[in-house]
Image: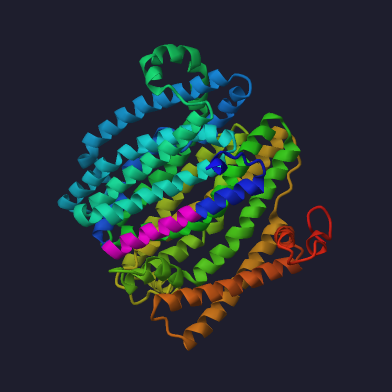
């Protein structure tokens, strides 16, 4: 297990580790959703399960989980290099303070859960609201555990132990899968909620154990017993974290409030609408987690260092490299997801009682979300760039506006679908669900996508302006590279569509194997065209991939060294 404690210094190596582990975690997430779909279908039980996450997720966000790394990391890194004991006490005091406050609020939410359900799921009847409240009460333990894990993850990330950091979400999904497989046959959907708590416990134990191994293990109970004395010693540092994290927490809270509002709106629609939205969102977040979050996590500590050193040139270069790298992977994923949406959903979820109508509606919602996949992938990095620069209010303001846009557009589109007017007819025809009686869930996806596109666009424009003003560095936007990537992604989508329709005419999609085979062949053709088009356009990213592949093949004595090393430093020959 020594590889868990290995430091990873390079950005691309760290992103590769995080991306690979993210892929493993997302695959487990797909397995989790497949088990849920097979056992419960897209019905009211999963509506209740998805709705029950809203209050625990909001609690986690309000108590620093959403802003832990961004707010704590700069303070911790400042002390860790010169005063390890002070850094250890800082983490211990912060964890103890979090534990006290989060436990108090979660206890309050536990008793208020039945009343809160009137706002969370206003469209549910009384018995379904009561069951949603029960599930919420079970899962209220998870934000406490995940919040502590988020604080401990600062130590892990600061020491660049990305193996440990990346393994934690895998354990979280494992806990949920165990809940589905072992507990739900006896306990029903409540067994899945217990699995959520088990996954959160494993998530926290891993990162807390790593902190102890690194010599930063907090004496949590001792700190609780002497919290007042520790506060006198470390109150200024903790106050600085809260001051920085406050806007960050509010910014992330707007995202949670948006999801809560969409679920509340979904509770008034046909049963299964919330489940369909949840399934589609989980599939949508697969490439975002693999590429967007991985690169943002790997780059953020460097952005913090460059901002602290007032090195504007390196800050801008690092940010530009990250944005371009994320676009390079996210754009073709978005295009191919739209084209192959039914294949993705059927391959991932098509089991048990998850019907073809469930598949079609989930695929339509997934296509709506995929319209904002590129925006969602870069949004995390752009937000963290502001945090590295010490500005948390700009992303807060932008997120607030984007949240209002999402909710407003969701209401507009849902009403349009309910009214069955010309807009609804055009949209259902576009998504190929014109014959479905309740397509309103697509409106929820369109509203979510509209707000996210506004959010990412505004953040990109503003971070270029703010970096120039605060660091005095010339900013080189990645517009030209973005245009090339977008054009190649569109071409990849067209090719994948042509392969798909020709394949469907020859081989009926009546088995899971055929669905996967057709989707894989069409996606492979699309990616080949994508990489080929960018190679002809002189893409640096393709050249780097070619050089890395050549070095690997040379090490296996398959290719001569000259195949991959000709050219300049960037591998462009």
Closer to us: 14 or 350: 14
- The structure residue drawn at horizontal position 53% and vertical position 26%, both measured from the top left corner, is 215
Q: Can residue 178 be seen in this snapshot?
A: yes
Which residue occupies the extreme bottom position in the image? 506
Residue 485 lies, with reference to residue 505, above or below; the image says above
In the shown orientation, is residue 356 left or right of residue 71?
A: left
Q: What is the total number of numbered labels drawn onto the structure image? A: 0
Q: Quadrant of the C terminus?
A: bottom right
Horizontal side of residue 539 vs 222, given as left or right: right
Q: Is residue 344 above or below residue 94?
A: below
Residue depicted at x 57% and y 26% = 75
Q: Residue at 43% across / 42% down in the picture?
A: 254
Q: In the image, 337: left or right of 104?
A: right
Q: Is the magenta stretch mostly helix, strand or loop?
A: helix
Residue 379 appearing in the image: no
Furthest-left residue in this view: 127
Residue 305 image point, x, y percent: 66, 33
The foreground one among 442 and 148 is 148
**Residue at 56% over, 48% down:** 18
User: Quarter-wise, where is residue 331 in the image?
Assistant: bottom right
| Range of magenta residues | 24-39
Can you give x and y, in whole percent of width and height, for residue 160 in the image? Answer: 59, 38
Residue 32: give x, y in percent of width and height: 37, 57
- Residue 106's place in the image compared with 168, above or below, is above
Q: Which of 175 and 286 is in front in this view?
A: 175
């Amino acid at each position: 297990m020594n590889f868990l404690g290995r430091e990873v210094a390079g950005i691309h190596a760290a992103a590769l580790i995080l991306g690979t582990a993210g892929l493993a975690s997302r695959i487990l997430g797909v397995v989790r959703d497949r088990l849920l779909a097979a056992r419960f279908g897209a019905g009211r039980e999963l509506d209740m399960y998805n709705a029950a996450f809203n209050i625990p997720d909001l609690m986690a966000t309000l108590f620093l989980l959403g802003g832990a790394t961004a707010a704590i990391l700069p303070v911790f890194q400042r002390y860790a290099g010169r005063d390890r004991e002070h850094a250890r006490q800082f983490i211990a005091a912060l964890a103890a303070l979090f534990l006290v406050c989060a436990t108090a609020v979660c206890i309050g939410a536990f008793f208020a859960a039945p009343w809160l359900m009137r706002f969370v799921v206003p469209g549910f009847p009384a018995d379904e609201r009561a069951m949603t409240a029960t599930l919420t009460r079970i899962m209220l333990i998870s934000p406490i555990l995940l919040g502590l894990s988020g604080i401990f993850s600062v130590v892990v990330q600061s020491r660049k132990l990305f193996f440990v950091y990346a393994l934690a979400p895998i354990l979280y999904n494992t806990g949920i899968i165990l809940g589905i497989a072992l507990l739900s046959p006896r306990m029903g959907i409540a067994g899945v909620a217990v699995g959520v708590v088990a996954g959160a416990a494993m998530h926290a134990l891993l990162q807390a154990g790593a902190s102890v191994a690194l010599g930063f293990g907090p004496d949590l109970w001792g700190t609780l017993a002497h919290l007042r004395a520790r506060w006198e010693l470390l109150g200024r540092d903790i106050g600085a974290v809260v001051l920085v994290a406050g806007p960050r927490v509010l910014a992330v809270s707007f995202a949670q409030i948006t999801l809560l509002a969409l679920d509340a709106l979904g509770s008034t629609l046909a049963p299964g609408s919330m489940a369909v939205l949840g399934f589609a969102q989980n599939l949508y977040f697969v490439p975002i987690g693999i590429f967007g979050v991985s690169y943002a996590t790997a780059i953020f500590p460097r952005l913090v260092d460059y901002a602290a050193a007032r090195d504007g040139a390196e800050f801008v270069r690092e940010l530009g490299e990250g944005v371009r790298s994320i676009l390079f992977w996210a754009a073709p994923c978005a295009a191919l997801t739209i084209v192959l949406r039914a294949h993705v959903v059927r391959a991932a979820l098509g089991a048990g009682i998850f019907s073809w109508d469930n598949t079609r509606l989930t695929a339509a919602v997934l296509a709506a979300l995929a319209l904002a996949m590129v925006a969602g992938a870069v949004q995390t990095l752009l937000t963290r760039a502001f945090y590295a620069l010490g500005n948390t209010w700009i992303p807060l303001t932008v997120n607030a506006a984007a949240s209002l846009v999402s909710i407003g557009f969701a209401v507009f589109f849902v009403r349009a679908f309910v009214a069955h007017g010309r807009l609804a007819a055009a949209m259902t025809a576009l998504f190929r669900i014109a014959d479905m009686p309740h397509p309103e869930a697509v409106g929820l996806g369109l509203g979510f996508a509209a707000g996210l596109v506004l959010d990412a666009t505004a953040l990109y424009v503003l971070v270029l302006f703010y970096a120039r003003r605060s660091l005095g560095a010339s900013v080189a936007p990645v517009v030209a590279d973005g245009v090339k990537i977008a054009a190649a992604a569109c071409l990849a989508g067209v090719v994948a569509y042509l392969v798909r329709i020709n394949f469907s005419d020859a081989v009926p999609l009546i088995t899971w194997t055929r669905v996967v085979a057709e989707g894989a062949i069409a996606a492979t053709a699309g990616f080949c065209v994508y990489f080929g088009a960018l190679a002809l356009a002189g893409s640096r990213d393709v050249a780097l991939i070619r050089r890395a592949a050549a070095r690997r093949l040379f090490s296996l004595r398959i290719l001569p060294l000259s195949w991959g090393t000709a050219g300049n430093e960037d591998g462009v020959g």
